[in-house]
Amino acid sequence: MSINQGRAVVTGLLFCLIMGQAVSVSMADNGKLTIARLKYTGGGDWYNDPEALSNLARELQRRAGIETNINQRIVGLGDDQLFSSPILFMTGHGEVKWTDTEIQHLHSYLTHGGFLYADDDYGMDEAFRREMKRAFPDKSFVELPYSHPIYHIIYDFPSGLPKHHEHDGKPPQGFGLFHDGRLIVYYTYESNISDGWADPKTHNDPPQKRETAFQMGVNIIAFALSQ
């Protein structure tokens, strides 16, 4: 599917199976893509860098022509609006906890067309992997090779993920979870590119760091829409 076809999917309908009932859910807001921030319990700061998605939305429009809602939408896995956003974003520094019902909703969302991008801001890794294993006990994250299209679809990253913030001195890694051949979750570890989407004054990052963060962000969304 081309990027243009992927954009068209945003204006279509997502059919989900929730608690045994088929639910038809709109995937667009006035023809614009909405990327929703995922709120969760457990103590992790899901609200970190609140301006990040609005800034990314502007760059998606400017760089890739993807009309994107700049007003941040916040959803939980128990919210009806979960199924009105084709792409979810989550980040944080600590614990992540989902109820059994939320796990069921996440599984339905992801296996019926939804996409989750998770960026470990440092300290989220153990809890996130544990909760994702509850949602998909038969699946495991795999590290994506540098040749994967997510690193080349618009901007070229021949060495994979850019390193945005230093955490434990480890190389940045991008992991994927697949369902029926489709990438349903992309997880960045030791990279923290979403900090680069924040306002310049938030982290005082140099322009080049913010540039590569936005480039990779555009690639992630463009690839998610191209599947």
Image: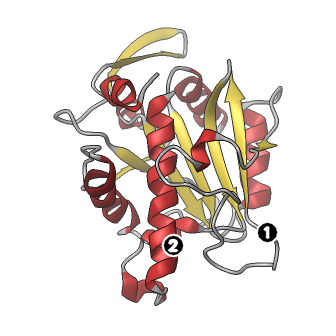
Disc 2 marks which amino acid?
A: Asp
Q: Position of residue 14 (x, y in %)?
A: 40, 19
Which disc, if any, is residue 171? 1
Q: Left or right of 86: which side holds 7? A: left
Which disc, if any, is residue 36? none
Dot 2: within a 10 Å radius of its alpha carbon, few (fewer than 14), some, or many (20 or more) residues? many
Q: Position of residue 57 (x, y in %)?
A: 31, 55
Q: Name the residue: 62% across, 28% down.
A: 107
Where 64 falls versus 11 (above or below)? below
Q: Position of residue 153 (x, y in %)?
A: 51, 43
* Quarter of the image where one finds residue 103: top right
Q: Name the residue: 42% across, 85% down.
A: 202
Residue 70 visible in image: yes
Disc 1 marks which amino acid?
A: Pro
Q: Name the residue: 76% across, 45% down.
A: 145
SS for callout 1: loop
Q: Left or right of 116: which side holds 24? A: left
Between the C-alphas of marks 1 and 2, the distance is 17 Å
Q: Which residue is mark 2?
A: 195
Closer-to-camera residue (104/219): 219
